Image: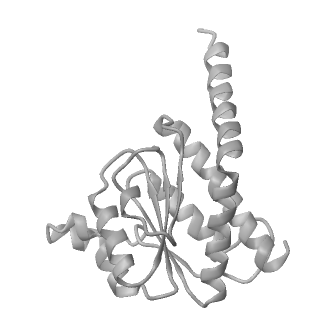
Amino acid sequence: MTDHRAFIENTFAEHMEAVAETASDLSGAISAIAEALVGTLLNEGRILACANGTANVLAQYFCTSLLNRLEQERPALPAINLGADATTYAAICRDNRFNDTFSRQVRALGKENDTLLVIVDDGHKANLIQAIQAAHDRQMRVIVISAKEENDIMSLLHPEDHEIALHDLSSTRAAEVTLLVINAICALIDQMLFGV
């Protein structure tokens, strides 16, 4: 049997380094995003979330943490993952409109005072770009959490929008750190709204 100890220890060390760097560099951005989302909720807005591929798991986790709870019992908060409805997603794709998968839903469901949360991994972005444009057309705020510092999505953001760009981590490290960022945002929302 091969000794995998060094590999495992290195994996955990890389994780801890990425987490520490994110906490140091992005705590202000995380706090600002939580405050913006609280503002959305207090103004009777909803949070729509979207992401592609494995990042969609993180979008669903975020929405579940708001709709159900993070750690403490509290009232449900309105959050919808646009990638969770496989039937709608497949129907839009079937009609050869993959790039419209999220923008079509944003135009139908989004309204002023809502916020669109976009989680960007390293893959396809055209449908996310169109979702952001649709959100702006509907007078919605946009929040982007990106696995990479440099991408074409950030140029679409308006002054009232928010972004977190991780330091060009590998896809696995980015997913791990994004999950911690989401947990911190959800915990701050609970604290600000309910004191829990």
Whole-percent x and y of residue 185?
Answer: 67, 62
| Residue 105 in the figure: left or right of residue 119 | left
Q: Quadrant of residue 194?
A: bottom right
| Residue 22 in the figure: left or right of residue 161 | right
Q: Quadrant of residue 5?
A: top right
Whole-percent x and y of residue 126?
Answer: 27, 59
* In front of the other: 21 or 75: 21
* In front of the other: 155 or 187: 155
Whole-percent x and y of residue 148?
Answer: 45, 43
* In front of the other: 82 or 31: 31
Residue lying farthest to the bottom in this orientation: 44
Q: Quadrant of the C terminus?
A: bottom right
- Residue name at image x 33 percent, y 76 percent: 134
Whole-percent x and y of residue 105?
Answer: 34, 79
* In front of the other: 148 or 72: 148
Residue lying farthest to the right in this orientation: 195
Is there any visible trace of residue 183 in the rendered image? no
